[in-house]
């Protein structure tokens, strides 16, 4: 009589990990929307690289052929679509990204239990251009999304208040993501680097990279810097680019904050 040896049971470990993704919401006329997107990419090249992007098609409601074309068009712009939101559909073609269900807006209350923003709001994560009110210190703004929440290795440590103090300069290519409060940088921030904070951002040197404050839905967040040479400033997703700040607030000490549905960049005396 022979006996079969029992198969060795191997455990497979599954882990849940949360990301805050960009949500792109194309609108008609699509050509104009793509033109605005190209303007954004031109001012912030590589901004979408390595970031989860969800395509919300509930406004456009295209057919399957149009979805395939749009995903391909975005791919040629360096934007990889990870999932699609489209009500009323149970599945798409196998060559398309999967349909996403159960998505939630990124808010401070939802992602940071026990911490409430000073003036909480919702970051919709839509990349769309909007025109602000006219004024001497107001720039064109648009709505951007929150970035991936993933702790990098900042050259500092959070204080008890949730503030992250960084005593060394931030070099080009570094990304500081702090989803628990304010970020204070005692040095300068190099071009090609990025700071993303749930609260406000304070830079006591020259800010040449990108700074996104209130990234999880804090409309009361602000950005302060001693010298503004930033590639991009954003508060709660509303952004202004270097090109749009030229001749207005470049090279000056500034603060950036939301004024209604406009991002205001004003000089500090």
Image (tube, grey):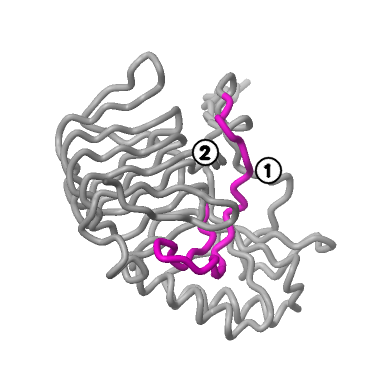
Taking depth in this image into account, of 165 and 49 the one nearest to the observer is 165
| Location of residue 208 in the rendering, given as x and y in whole percent from the top left corner | 22, 55
In the rendered view, would you say 207 is above or below 12?
Answer: below
Magenta stretch, overall SS? loop
Q: In this image, 176 relative to 62: left or right?
A: left
The residue positioned 66% from the left and 83% from the top of the image is 29
Q: Residue at x 48, y 41 (%)?
A: 214
Mark 2 and mark 1 in contact? Answer it, CB < 8 Å: no
Q: Residue at x 54, y 38 (%)?
A: 218
Residue 223 point in image, percent of width and height: 37, 44
Report helix, strand or loop for mark 1: loop
Image quadrant where residue 4 sits: top right
In which quadrant is the N terminus drawn? top right
Residue 183, numbered circle: none
Q: Taking 79 as reference, is 103 above or below it?
A: above
Magenta stretch bounds: 116-145
The image's mark for residue 220 is: 2
Q: Residue at x 75, y 62 (%)?
A: 86
Closer to viewer: mark 2 or mark 1: 2
Picture coordinates of residue 43, whole percent (x, y): 35, 70
- The numbered mark at residue 104 is 1
Q: Quadrant of residue 224?
A: top left
Disc 1 crowd, CA 10 A, few/some/many (<14, 14-19, 20+): few
């Amino acid at each position: 009589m022979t006996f079969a040896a029992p198969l060795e049971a191997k455990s497979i470990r599954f882990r849940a990990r949360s990301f805050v993704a960009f949500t792109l919401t194309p609108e008609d006329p699509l050509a104009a929307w793509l033109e605005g997107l190209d303007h954004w990419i031109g001012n912030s090249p590589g901004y979408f690289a390595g970031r989860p992007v969800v395509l919300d098609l509930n406004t456009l409601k295209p057919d399957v052929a149009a979805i395939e074309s749009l995903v391909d068009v975005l791919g040629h712009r360096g934007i990889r679509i990870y999932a699609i939101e489209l009500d009323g559909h149970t599945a798409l073609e196998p060559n398309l990204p999967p349909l996403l269900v159960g998505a939630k807006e990124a808010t401070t209350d939802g992602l940071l239990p026990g911490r409430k923003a000073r003036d909480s709001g919702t970051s919709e994560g839509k990349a769309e251009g909007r025109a602000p009110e006219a004024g001497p210190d107001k720039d064109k703004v648009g709505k951007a999304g929150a970035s991936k929440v993933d702790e990098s290795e900042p050259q500092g440590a959070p204080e008890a208040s949730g503030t992250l103090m960084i005593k060394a300069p931030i070099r080009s290519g570094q990304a500081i993501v702090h989803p628990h409060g304010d970020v204070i940088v005692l040095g300068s921030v190099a071009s090609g680097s990025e700071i993303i904070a749930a609260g406000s951002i304070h830079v006591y040197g020259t800010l040449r990279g990108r700074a996104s404050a209130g990234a999880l839905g804090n409309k009361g967040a602000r950005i302060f810097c001693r010298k503004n040479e930033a590639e991009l400033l954003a508060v709660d997703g509303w952004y202004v680019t270097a090109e749009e700040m030229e001749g207005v607030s470049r090279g000056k000490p500034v603060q950036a904050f939301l004024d209604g549905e406009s991002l205001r960049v004003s000089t500090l005396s």
